[in-house]
Amino acid sequence: MFNLKFQEVIGLLLGPEAHGERIGVFHPLIDVYENADGLCIEAEIPGVCPEDVSVEVMGRSIVISGTKKDAVTNRGVRYIRMERGFGKFTREFEIPERFNLEQVDARFMDGVLKIRIARIEEGVKKVKRIEIS
């Protein structure tokens, strides 16, 4: 509600040209979990085309960015109620050393981006019991 009111005020201040590139807020929901094979990152981004999403490795981080476009922008509509967010988004996640950023797989299906990062085998430490003499 607050975001919509803010957009209305900005629209009044900037005039009709502000509606062409509406100020939008979109924050995809993310799950990060670990399983036996590696690290999984899943992002809910319904309504976003795969070509509007980017997944990049930067150092020890994975950066997910993109744009969720408003389908009715520039169609002469005036929102009465707006609950869905639109706009550019970026999410960045620091990846622990035990995962191999050379083996990253990203798939997009049913509005969910799934990123899998393989575990480094030699990075997994086994417990070795030391005899005390």
Image: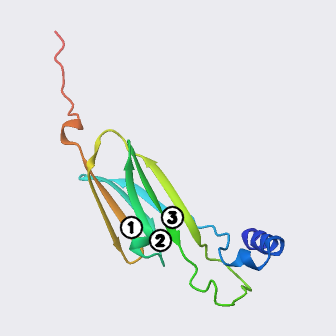
- Determine whether the residue tagged by mark 1 lies in a helix, strand or loop: strand
Mark closer to the chain start, 2 or 1? 2
Image quadrant in which you'd find residue 81: bottom right
**Label 2, on which residue?**
45
Question: Given contact means CB atoms under 8 Å apart, are the residues at marks 2 and 3 in contact?
Answer: no
Pick the front one: 77 or 83: 77
Mark closer to the chain start, 3 or 1? 3
Q: Is residue 79 left or right of residue 65?
A: right
Name the kind of residue labelled 1 in the image.
Leu
Tell which tag, 2 or 3, sits nearer the viewer: 2
**Label 1, on which residue?**
113
What residue is drawn where x is 77% and y is 68%? Answer: 6
Which quadrant does the N terminus fall into?
Answer: bottom right
What residue is drawn where x is 52% and y is 69%? Answer: 67
Q: Residue 54: percent from the left, percent from the top? A: 41, 62
Q: Is residue 111 left or right of residue 77?
A: left
Name the kind of residue labelled 2 in the image.
Ile
Q: Is the residue 24 above or below the residue 31 in the image? A: below
Label 3 crowd (10 A; few <14 / some 14-19 / many >=20):
few
Label 2 crowd (10 A; few <14 / some 14-19 / many >=20):
many
Q: Which mark is residue 86?
A: none
Q: Residue 123: percent from the left, percent from the top? A: 23, 36
Q: Residue 44: percent from the left, percent from the top? A: 46, 69
Q: Which mark is residue 29?
A: 3
Q: Is residue 26 left or right of residue 122?
A: right
Question: Given contact means CB atoms under 8 Å apart, are the residues at marks 3 and 1 in contact?
Answer: no
Q: CA distance from mark 3 to mark 1?
A: 11 Å
Image quadrant in which you'd find residue 3: bottom right
Q: CA distance from mark 2 to mark 3?
A: 8 Å
Name the kind of residue labelled 3 in the image.
Leu
